[in-house]
Image: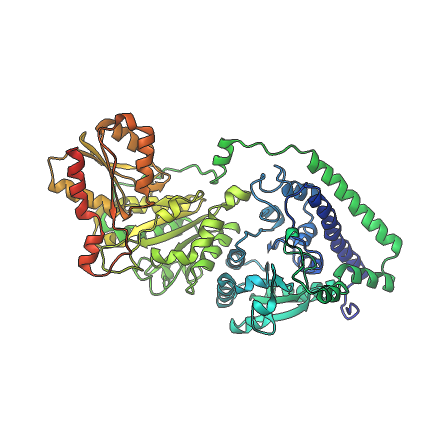
Amino acid sequence: MNYNKFSVTDIQKIQLYKQLIKPRLIEEKMLILLRQGRITKWFSGIGQEAVSVGVTSALHTSEYILPMHRNLGIFTTRNIPLRRLFAQWQGKANGFTNGRDRSFHFGTKEYKIIGMISHLGPQLGVADGIALAHKLQKKKQVTAVFTGEGGTSEGDFHEALNIASVWKLPVLFCVENNGYGLSTPTNEQYNCKNIADKGIGYGIDSYTIDGNNILEVFTKVNTICSDIRENPRPVLLEFKTFRMRGHEEASGTKYVPQDLLDTWAKRDPVINYEKFLLDEGVLTSEDIEEIKDTIQKEINEHLQIANNEPEVISDTVTELNAIYKNYTFETITPNSSTENIRFIDAISQGLKQSMQKHDNLVLMGQDIADYGGVFKITEGFVDDFGKERVRNTPICESAIVSTAMGLSINGMKAVVEMQFADFVSTGFNPIVNYLAKSHYRWGENAAVVIRMPCGAGVGAGPFHSQTNEAWFTKTPGLKVIYPAFPYDAKGLLATAINDPNPVLFFEHKALYRSLYQDVPTNYYTLPFGKASLLKSGDAITIVSYGAGVHWALETLENNSEIKADLIDLRTLQPLDTETIYNSVKKTGRLIILQEDSMFGGIASDISALVMENCFEYLDAPVRRVASLETPIPFSKNLENNYLPKQRFTKALLELLAY
């Protein structure tokens, strides 16, 4: 390897050596501990250290970096205390996840490091969001994100590159091409000569760099970062390197030809750089031994501290309280001035007034800018707030959700409009695995609201009619809101945006333009977890939400002799079980109406909860009424039969007669 062609001072050369040797010495110690059973898993970066160290050294300490599980050099170069890393790997409380996650699956905003999840791809979009926040904040900063050559096959990689290119985001996409994705060689991963070639299709600069040459990595990345700070844009970097050990230690390297291992062993980034420094007289053998001894002493001291730390003690209350970021709801009372508006107008008003209240709030979605969205909810918003805050997005739900998370990490708020709730399936992974789990794992919240236009009854067919709230009510860490009236929709949306936790906000399309209500003109909030008692009676309890509430109201109007408690849940997570239980204890009968198909829906959970907590008060079995167990059909007659509206009346009368 040629080191002489790079202009680096001797002081920088020595500092780079110290940063390079440190992760190597730590790894060698960790491999011993792994064999001793002191840690449970290890993803080795031996042979790749120059990439982590070189990139991190070129970044400012105030700039975010999003590493992978082989990037120990990033953490050590950012000078994270080793005792905390050791505690993390042992599952101790003084790690970064309180024993809730392992290895490098964590973040620390103190050191501007945002760790990976096992699904790899979402962090690329998160980097977009962090960089977008920097750009909106007028900060000249770079965000660096890592992935491997295998990760470039994921859709999130392509979505994130496309977003960064279209929005000219200052993101450094770092691909460590280390030869194998677990055991799959590169020739089975992609069919272009270099991964850097993929940048061409997205109109971004891309470079291939010798990832084993620490001076090449540092100098080239340093030059590129300096330019990006002044001329914001994404850059794709492919670092050619090699993984000398298994994907993780249990995997081994039997699938790697020995001659390939031998070839790359000769290009070891630590050994070669050390020899260069000795040959150049920058360091002596004695200097090197002193450096290693100092690091070894630090390792042993900090390892002892971590070893002496007690094991994490599980406490159920503590664990449950870690799911969401603490949030004290602020009641903002509506004024007396009202206007009779549609459901859709209430949503639009709530969004606009929240945009006025929070100057760090960004709206993102397909066609939401000049066009105003397919439902025209954001029509005119560009005139009021500009395209920086009201952003049309490419069709890439997964990366946009991840981008929203990045905005939140970097001090902003985001509302993402799914054009139709059905389309959330292509953004499912970052919602349930990143947004939902981050606070529990390492204390980072997601100030993200995802608006979900949903529901049948408008002849939109199988892909534009689903009400898929049950996908999310079972995922700890998410809040799920589903209003049935304009008044509730406006107040609950304001609360959702104020809440620092991720919220799925369902809006029934059939109610958008058919339902009117007197709604306060000012900004106001409504609490989560508080159902609304719409009618009172002692014969039976009816529980529903969304359009189902209006079907139940119509049924009661047509059967005025039925005296029922009608409960509109309004929020599904958190769920107001107290109101349900109190009503059931009074009436002795419960029927639950949902638009979603029966199996696995929220009605099933409510039924189970009532059976477990109110069984002795029941005079009849709990009854659930739901849509058919089929996809949602297009034809009006088929759709009417699919929906439970007509079946509800029959079931209600049968339960009353039980």
Is residue 74 at all visible to an observer of this figure?
A: yes
Quadrant location, the C terminus:
top left
Frontmost residue, 104 versus 75? 104
Q: Residue furthest top?
A: 616
How many marks on residues? 0
Please give left or right for residue 304 compared with residue 587 in the image. Answer: right
Residue located 21% across and 56% down the image = 639
Is residue 361 at all visible to an observer of this figure?
A: no
The figure's colour scheme reads: rainbow
Please give left or right for residue 550 compared with residue 155 in the image. Answer: left
Frontmost residue, 624 versus 122? 624
Quadrant in the rendering for residue 418: bottom left
Residue located 27% across and 37% down the image = 532
Q: Residue furthest front?
A: 254
Please give left or right for residue 420 compared with residue 534 in the image. Answer: right
Frontmost residue, 219 versus 469? 469
Indicate the position of residue 499 as horizontal and vertical percent values: 42, 43
Indicate the position of residue 321 as horizontal and vertical percent values: 48, 35
In this rendering, the answer to whether 154 lies above or below 586 is: below
Quadrant location, the N terminus:
bottom right
Indicate the position of residue 21 as horizontal and vertical percent values: 76, 54
Indicate the position of residue 210 as horizontal and vertical percent values: 70, 67
In this rendering, the answer to whether 91 lies above or below 64 is: above
